[in-house]
Image: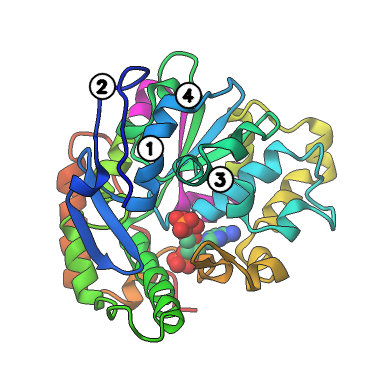
Amino acid sequence: MSMVAWSSSTDDACAIADITSLPLETRFPPFRLRQYGGFWLLEKFLEGVPALHSVFEPRPSDVVLGSFPKCGTTWLKALAFATRNRADHPPGGLDHPLRRRNPHDIVHYLELQFAVSMGHALAALPSPRVLATHLPYSLLPRRITAGQGCRIVYICRDPKDAFVSSWFFTNKTAAAERARAGGEEPPPYTFEEAFELFCDGICVSGPQWRHVLGYWEESRRRPEKVLFLRYEEMLRDTAGNVRKLAEFMGCGFSGEEEASGVVQDIVELCSLKSLKNMDVNKSGSHGPLAHESFFRKGVAGDWSNHMTPAMAERLDTIVEDALRGSGLTFDVAEPEPSA
Ligand code: PAP
């Protein structure tokens, strides 16, 4: 395990000398979580945080997509990339990058890039860059959050659906790892065990409510710098949210583009059906994560097919209590019929 020196001299006043000294959670095979700054973070991602803080040089045109896992990150990556780069890559084009590469291979996680390559791949990207993070707001470098910094787009989702989505994702990934390791890996946890952990805030980037609150509060303080989106609203009105996203990123659609159907082209290119059916997303992997595992049902309210009403009420209460007074609520959508 690597020893990581986290220098506070250039940036934030937080320092860890050794990631291995942090509390460890191993009940999410193949993922290992470490607790730092009040959150449970992927160990691999955490390894990149010191360099992200000390080395990353944001550009004024950067847009950083923030999310708690399983809240629509893949979709937002696709939409933001397609919107921002529509001049070079018309969304209706048959050779669009999203037809050849998984969204996670186009829009990189900041902390992961610094873990694997000291961010060299990011430095080589042309402007304007679209980047991403699963880090909580409080652990982002001040170079991103203070002063000129970067524009940030955060996507949130009903935590019950985020939990159910993560359950399927983790299990699928764990099963693949077990198969690869010849059954040597520990068996995955049960749905009930995972739920208990989630309610205790123990999950990737958890607690969910603390993650969402950090970005929510900042979006209220600095709406020109932090745009707060909701997965459920994006499902209800994808085109409207793509317009909002484009305006925020400083590349609103012209009348001519509107008339020629560019917005609709982006919506269709990035729809679940479209991305799921692309050859590149039916095979291949992003590290240990199969591309296809990022695309499942893509609906609001799937939790009702998997959670008991008592479980749902318990999680709703935990989240409501944590968010009380913040002005943020999860408008509990009517579950959609099971697909
Ligand atoms: P990540 O944090 O690991 O990147 P993320 O993309 O945030 O995952 O979440 C995956 C969820 O988004 C899945 O939800 P589900 O399990 O409830 O179905 C996935 O289906 C959904 N999703 C992925 N792509 C799209 C899309 N283009 N449109 C709508 N939902 C999508």
238 relative to 63, above or below: below
Mark 4 sits near ligand 1, with its Cβ under 8 Å away: no
> In this figure, which residue is indicated by the disc labeled 3?
108
Q: Mark 4 points at which residue?
A: 225
Closer to the observer: label 4 or label 3? 3
Determine the secondary structure under disc 1: helix
Reading the image, the residue beneath label 1 is: 49
- Name which residue lies at 24% across and 78% down: 190
Q: Which of marks 1 and 2 is nearer the N terminus?
A: 2
Marks 2 and 4 sit apart, C-alpha to C-alpha, by: 23 Å
Residue 235 shown in magenta: yes
Q: In which quadrant of the rendered view does residue 317 lie?
A: bottom left
Instruction: Check disc 3: other Cα within 10 Å, few if <14, some if 14-19, many if 20+.
Output: many
Amino acid type at mark 1: Val
28 versus 319 height, above or below: below
Indicate how the structure is coloured in the image. rainbow
Residue 299 visible, this angle: no
Q: With 255 as the anchor, is 73 left or right in this view?
A: left
What's the amino acid at mark 2? Answer: Ala
Label located before the other in sequence (2 or 4): 2
Q: Where is residue 229 in the image (x, y as percent from the top left)?
A: 46, 42
The boundaries of the magenta stretch are 218-240
- 145 on left or right of 90: left
Residue under label 2, please give it: 13
Tag 1 near tag 3, CB within 8 Å: no
Question: How far across and down, in percent of the image, does residue 268 sit?
Answer: 71, 57
Q: Which residue is drawn at 40% across and 66% down?
A: 165
Residue type at tag 3: His
Mark 2 lies on a secondary structure that is: loop
The location of residue 117, given as percent across then percent down, is 53, 42
What residue do we see at 52% from left, 61% from top?
287
Q: Distance between the residues labelled 1 and 2?
A: 13 Å
